[in-house]
Image (cartoon, rainbow, N blue to C red):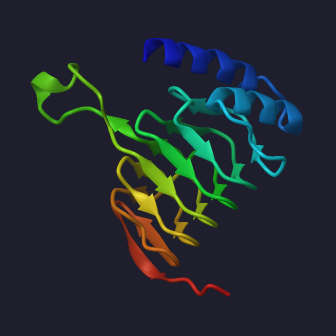
């Protein structure tokens, strides 16, 4: 894990020095970070932070705005046509609640973000959740449980606010 973090820090440092309009350079370094090529529709505005990168899977036509953090130890799957706003945190890892165990280990659960999701500014997703197709996570929300498809969720913890029409 330490080697993975060092590798990610080296790549993200280089990525975060690129100008926002160097789309080809950003795609190349992000592809190196995650270990698989992203498509030409992928767009990211640096800075970006991650603990490893190898457990991030990105679909087609994904946009990630600036200052996004992805702790990917548990695995992060991002579907096609996803929009991720600025200052979003996607955190798959944590520590046990028991004080004696907190420094002993790291826990991790996967996060899945399905097709055509919009995660608005400042939202946080916690490990073990799935955000369903076409859903919107409102700005500043903390997602601690699954988000149904075609819904708007918001708050802390995030709750369904209303349905979203597919049209």
Could you tell me if residue 152 is visible in this image?
yes
* Residue at horizontal 59 percent and vertical 21 percent from the top: 8
* Residue at horizontal 49 percent and vertical 77 percent from the top: 151
Q: Nearer the viewer, residue 16 or 129?
A: 129
Position of residue 62 in the picture relative to residue 28 (left or right): left
Could you tell me if residue 22 is visible in this image?
no
User: Compared with residue 96, is residue 43 higher up or lower down, i.e. above or below?
Assistant: below
* Residue at horizontal 40 percent and vertical 38 percent from the top: 74
User: Compared with residue 21, is residue 42 higher up or lower down, i.e. above or below?
Assistant: below
Res 68 → quadrant: top right
The image position of residue 65, as x and y in percent, is 69, 47
Which residue occupies the extreme front position in the image? Answer: 36
The image position of residue 148, as x and y in percent, is 43, 73
User: Compared with residue 14, is residue 156 higher up or lower down, i.e. above or below?
Assistant: below
Q: Nearer the viewer, residue 70 or 32?
A: 32
The image position of residue 82, as x and y in percent, is 65, 59
User: Compared with residue 82, is residue 46 higher up or lower down, i.e. above or below?
Assistant: above
Position of residue 143 in the picture relative to residue 46 (left or right): left
* Residue at horizontal 67 percent and vertical 59 percent from the top: 80
Position of residue 130 in the picture relative to residue 36 (left or right): left
Position of residue 28 in the picture relative to residue 75 (left or right): right
């Amino acid at each position: 894990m330490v080697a993975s973090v060092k590798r990610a820090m080296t790549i993200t440092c280089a990525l975060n020095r690129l100008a926002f309009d160097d789309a080809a350079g950003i795609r190349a370094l992000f592809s190196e970070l995650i270990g698989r090529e992203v498509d030409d529709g992928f767009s990211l505005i640096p800075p970006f932070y991650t603990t490893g990168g190898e457990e991030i899977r990105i679909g087609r036509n994904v946009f990630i705005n600036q200052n996004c953090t992805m702790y990917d130890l548990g695995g992060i799957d991002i579907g096609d046509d996803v929009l991720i706003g600025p200052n979003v945190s996607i955190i798959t890892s944590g520590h046990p609640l028991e004080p004696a165990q907190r420094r002993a280990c790291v826990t991790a659960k996967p996060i899945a973000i399905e097709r055509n999701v919009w995660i608005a500014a400042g939202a946080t997703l916690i490990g073990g959740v799935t955000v369903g197709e076409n859903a919107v996570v409102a700005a500043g929300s903390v997602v601690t449980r699954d988000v149904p498809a075609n819904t708007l969720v918001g708050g802390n913890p995030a709750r369904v606010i209303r349905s979203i029409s597919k049209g």
